[in-house]
Image: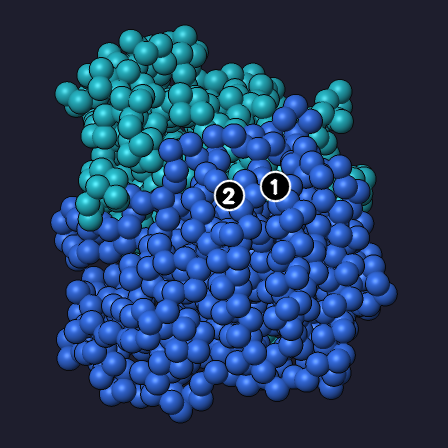
Chain colours: A cyan, B blue
Amino acid sequence: MVQQQLSDIDIAQSTELLPIQTIAQQLNLKADQYECYGRHKAKVSIDVLKDLQHQKPGHIVLVTSINPTASGEGKSTLTVGLGQALNKIGKNAVIALREPSLGPVMGMKGGAAGGGYSQILPMEDINLHFTGDLHAITSAHNLLAALIDNHIHQGNSLHIDPQRIVWKRVLDLNDRALRQMVIGLGGPANGTPREDGFDITVASEIMAILCLAMDLEDLKARLSRIVIAYSDNKEPITVKDLGAEGALTVLLKDAIHPNLVQTIEHTPAFVHGGPFANIAHGCSSLVATMMAAKLADYCVTEAGFGADLGAEKFLDIKMRTGDLKPSAVVIVATVRALKMHGGVAKSDLQKENLEALQQGVANLKKHMETISHYGLPYVIAINRFTTDTEAELAFLIDWCKANGARAELANVWEEGGQGGIALAEAVVAAIDQESNAFQPLYALHDSIEEKINQIVKKVYGGGRIEFSATAKKQLQAIAAHGWEHLPICIAKTQYSLSDDPTKVGRPEGFTIHIRELVPRIGAGFIVVMTGSILTMPGLPKQPATLNIGLNADGQVEGLF
Amino acid sequence: MVQQQLSDIDIAQSTELLPIQTIAQQLNLKADQYECYGRHKAKVSIDVLKDLQHQKPGHIVLVTSINPTASGEGKSTLTVGLGQALNKIGKNAVIALREPSLGPVMGMKGGAAGGGYSQILPMEDINLHFTGDLHAITSAHNLLAALIDNHIHQGNSLHIDPQRIVWKRVLDLNDRALRQMVIGLGGPANGTPREDGFDITVASEIMAILCLAMDLEDLKARLSRIVIAYSDNKEPITVKDLGAEGALTVLLKDAIHPNLVQTIEHTPAFVHGGPFANIAHGCSSLVATMMAAKLADYCVTEAGFGADLGAEKFLDIKMRTGDLKPSAVVIVATVRALKMHGGVAKSDLQKENLEALQQGVANLKKHMETISHYGLPYVIAINRFTTDTEAELAFLIDWCKANGARAELANVWEEGGQGGIALAEAVVAAIDQESNAFQPLYALHDSIEEKINQIVKKVYGGGRIEFSATAKKQLQAIAAHGWEHLPICIAKTQYSLSDDPTKVGRPEGFTIHIRELVPRIGAGFIVVMTGSILTMPGLPKQPATLNIGLNADGQVEGLF
């Protein structure tokens, strides 16, 4: 296995794509149910969901992972590969993934369209402007910000307290210099000076809203409920108070339709929405998942970061909002990351180390238990890397079996769907043979503290919860404003089950520190901030940007 | 004539559009020469220009106007109407217009897709995100800004002086609070604190570049030459020094292809690029004009504001850059605006006032002389408004004839192409019968002062030119850096021939005050700032935004 000889973009550009109309026809979509954006992208009308309202949905398979290393465990690649593999064994599968953000693409992380022979295409378009959804969100978000400052400038009849504006601005870029600023300088013609800052677009509440809205009406209702500021007497002021929900909906009227593309093996894939998995719920759009499930027997989708973050939010927020029941979960694990959880330094991960692996599987064990808490069948996918030794792989498979779990090696980066056939068969078997008693972890009528408690105890395996003085005050305000019934969305480091990124493996008895609570009433959840979470990344010393260009044939180079 | 009973959007939404493929076929485009963006928009590959390089271009007709009132004189509507009318009289015409900016659409001015029965459609899409060109420019512009701050943060090996960064940030919005700000606050992790500000996207040098680039290679070369800052020893630092030209080109690789739509009468229209007409050259893209001229016998296109701004830059910058020769100019005049130039207050413009009209025609006279300076035939288009009286119209037509000019009434808002037939015939006659000795006003090897002098004397009719101390220093720097050979792009109020918006009519002997010179080396011109020009508009007390929404049928309401 020499898996990195060809780059992702080389493989992508050597693939002959089918016209997107052909992919749409595979899904039995009629010509008036979708619009083409160029030759290989389409937007499928959300009205398809109405047309298919009486059709029984197919199986929803969630792909999640152990706590990842900084470079990720190949969850998107695995999701694409599993979708392709299900089609190879005669099942009818559609993939639902998140849209990449331009910030990381131009920064360090690279694209988010899978890899190798398990990619979604055209990866250059998907990783750049795609069909403009993120740009629409940026426009809507910043229009709202401009309306707020304009409202104050023009007389402030709503009595907005300029120091209690909770609506920042956004750009789909990594730009640390915009994190904190003072705006409105230069005299009265330029508005009221105040502190402000930019987040990355994927951290916008509008992104979270787009990903949870069931239709245009629900989108508008959610936008109306966004809290933008507090008044002089500390009452919440909403988008509806400002009267901007109509224009914001108009700016998002195209973005709400799921985007259809294909994988390298021509499996249909919806790529729609991409909220941050730490500050928001980190799942692709609900409408895309619903559409994929209605149009196929299996919808394979993923949630951001490890099961403690992504899967928890997928199950407690996204599935509950859509009144959906997932059929199975795939937990992606790598030998590399498990050795890291066993205490191995990043620079030594390439060396065989069975002892570390034996230590590190505790992290995987916790995530297996978590999925069981939700009453769901699961399969462990061991995503192969060239540096894995046979002894390590053998140990890991044996360990999974000894722990009563289905586990399969997957090699979908190199082999495409072919490399995921055993996994696909295991997933089908788990769905067909195991019981499914899915239920969310907490009840909506539980208090916010109780919801946090359930997640910290059952998903993180933590001991105590400590609220900051600010958080305690905010708990009271949330109750006073009648927002206690909402689900919670915990913002936490992805590297550890705890809120301390250095605590690898399966830490126990730790304390989770709740710094702040941020009501996102439009999205419909309360963000619970643990530790400090950056909502605007920075660029590295050598940004990926500097390698990107067009070659003499007009093809994009340097995207990865 | 009750011309405002139906709104623009009502008329637009009652029109049955042809599939964009049908429009493309009308132009003899092959399926592989364009890509559809939905059903009614397409991007036509710039490679078409290569395919047609040996074909003789059709006639380029420029639509310009007298100095306008704040609400404009209907130049875009007239351009669309004239294109439709040419087709009605059996000529083969294609229209080339600018893309609207979301800022004014959501602010005060409304859309920019023509009006009434002379609109380009789908106006909702064109006025909102369209095919994403403006978003691509916003992304590229702000990525460059982020790279500059990141370069400084990561060690500043180019020795950028943080106080001499000349590259601001942009958003496609009206947002006065972002005009002046201090960024990089919050400690060393957030970069270096410095003053900064946002312009509206249409004021970006990248917009000007996109509109003047001949192909992808030229685009990249122009991007490379952008001056982003000056070093500690005051030397210019460019995009090439930063190594970002490849990534910026990639972000603009789709935006460079002209967008094809149709008018209400199914005349093909390219809508591509829309630089500010005061701070930049204010014309739609050169490639779209070239393409329209290659694909039809007549290309009807417009330039922003009055002939003193738009036409001058169209002729001295755009035509020269493309090595093109226009065939004729249409000068749009309205009774309303001429009465304003005769000293009538805005509130009294609806009343008949022949004396004021007699005074005001002096403004029109100056623009007629200007076009003659360029050696071009012209036709005066009197754009009818319901408030014009028969006596006023008769006076104006007689006056034009007495001054040896072709002049025709046009009623294209209400009647579409039918209302522009006489005008179309006059344009064809002017092209066929009159001599054309087109040449730009100044030579590129003239000094910057001499270029300014030529325009102030021959186009504005001014007396003296006064340079600020700053401008004088900048003249020296421009010479020292070897930029004197570039054309100039004067930023001036559109309301007067002078730099004082209150001086209506045909002021004489006035002084033009040159405040500042801004080298735009990527765009390929030196911006000459007179008076104070806002590059980021603000929202009005009642922004158009608040009327915009979707109705129960999912149609956009409140756009105009």
Judge from the rendering whether residue B27 lies leftward or rightward of residue A272; answer left or right.
right
Task: Name the mark on residue B67.
Answer: none
The answer to the question of whether label 1 and label 2 lie on touching residues, with beta carbons closer than 8 A, is yes
Residue at 17 percent across and 74 percent down: it is B469
Residue sitting at 22 percent across and 37 percent down?
A: A192
From what the image shows, is residue B223 above or below residue B364? below
Q: Is residue A541 visible?
A: no
The image quadrant of residue B235 is bottom left
Alpha carbon distance from label 1 to label 2:
9 Å
Q: Which image quarter: residue B239? A: bottom left
Secondary structure under tag 1 reads: loop
Q: Is residue A178 above or below residue B56?
A: above
| Three-letter code for the amino acid on which mark 2 is drawn | Leu
Asked if A396 appears above or below B318 in the picture, the reply is: above
For disc 2, the marked residue is B349
Looking at the rendered structure, the kind of residue marked 1 is: Thr
Q: Which is more toward the observer, B474 or B65?
A: B65
State the count of labels: 2
Q: Quadrant of the C terminus of chain B?
A: top right
| Residue B339 appears in view | yes
Chain that bears disc 2: B
Binning the other alpha carbons within 10 Å of mark 1 as few (below 14), some (14 to 19) or many (20 upward) gives some
Q: Label 2: state its secondary structure.
A: loop
| Disc on res. B387 | 1
Q: Give the residue drawn at x 52%, y 80%.
A: B373
